[in-house]
Image (cartoon, grey):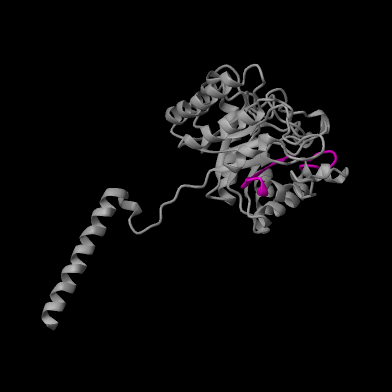
Amino acid sequence: MKKTFRKVFLTAIATCTLCLTACADDNSRPSDIGHEVSTPAFAKGADVSWVTEMESKGVKFYDKGGNEKECMALMKDLGFNSIRLRVWVNPENGWNGKQDVLAKARRAQALGMRLMIDFHYSDTWADPGHQDKPAAWRDYSLEQLVQAVADHTKDILNTLKTEGIDVEWVQVGNETTTGMLWETGRAKDSDFKNFTQLVNSGYDAVKSVYPDAKVIIHIDNGFDLGRFTWMFDGLRREGGKWDIIGMSLYPEDDNWQELTDKCLANMKTLAERYGTDVILCEIGMPWNSPNAATVMEKMVRGCKAESHCHGIFYWEPESYNGWNGYQKGAFDNSGKPTAAMDAFSL
């Protein structure tokens, strides 16, 4: 009886071992065997960099039932899992400077939100029309700017890391469609050398503090494929380094169908062309647009369906009642979220 039981037992073990080996052969790469393999969750994000300034002016935020809520906690209730924060070097009034960024990052971390840090490398807005050097860097040579980018990047990120704050993505520049830190770092014609040195300095600085963070190079007009291929072909030619291609998209009521179709198609094309993932760093629609909810649902679903897309971030959805003249938030004039926010619960 014992011999029969032992024989059956050993046969069962051998069979299970063969089954497990076959499963590993079918579903795993050799390096994955014995390790858990997981894909990062899709990021449903909001850039709420204005929030502390708005609060200082007495602005409040409410859920759909009219109950007052802290802004980031409200975002989490609405289905958001990620926060994006911009960084300015020496802003005149302190907003978006190191201590302000730290205060907002602490909130996001406490809520369990994932974090994207967006370096502008300026004292104020950096975008396709403005890439001004910080005042303190104005007379720097290229070599000094390369060092300043590294030092500033490390300073901010080390401040966050010391506080135990996790950073998942870092933008080296904001909407750097023709470079950054003009004129020294302007990308033009076929000259990408200076810009690439600045980008690589930022990239290396990020990795020295957060080795696993994904570095993003961010361009506007996600519907314009040529804009992206010009930039990333140029960077690649000069040995530029990045992990993710970042996009912005701001459709209007008269073009949203075309622009969203093109943007989603471009994600696939760019991922295939450069072998890197993509992310929609910014999106927004006029808050009272009859199409805003439809656009957001289309883009959330479309981005989730693209295997190379890490996520989608609404730019300053908490802005309302004409804050700073901005009309593309996703709250109504009473401070409550509009239907455009519903897509982020999908």
**For residue 28, side relative to residue 321 (left or right):** left
Q: Is residue 241 visible?
A: no
Looking at this rendering, what residue extends furthest in the front direction?
A: 65
User: Observer-nearest residue: 248 or 119?
Assistant: 248
Q: Is residue 42 left or right of residue 274?
A: right
Magenta-drawn stretch contains 86: yes
Q: Is residue 109 magenta?
A: no
On screen, 229 above or below 27? above
Which residue occupies 66% across, 40% down?
A: 46
Residue 173: x and y, percent? Answer: 64, 34
Q: Residue at x 79, y 49 (%)?
A: 67
> Magenta-highlighted stretch: main secondary structure?
loop
Query: Does residue 201 sit above or below 15 in this rendering?
Result: above
Q: Position of residue 298 (x, y in %)?
A: 56, 30
* Quadrant of the rendered image containing residue 21: bottom left
Q: Quadrant of the N terminus?
A: bottom left
Quadrant in the picture for residue 192: top right
Q: Residue at x 73, y 33 (%)?
A: 329
Over which residues does the magenta segment extend?
76-96
Farthest right residue in view = 57
The residue located at (75%, 36%) in the rendering is 331
Q: Quadrant of the C terminus?
A: top right
Q: Position of residue 169 (x, y in %)?
A: 58, 44
Camera-side residue: 101 or 59? Answer: 59
Q: Position of residue 257 (x, y in %)?
A: 58, 20
User: Count of labels shown?
Assistant: 0
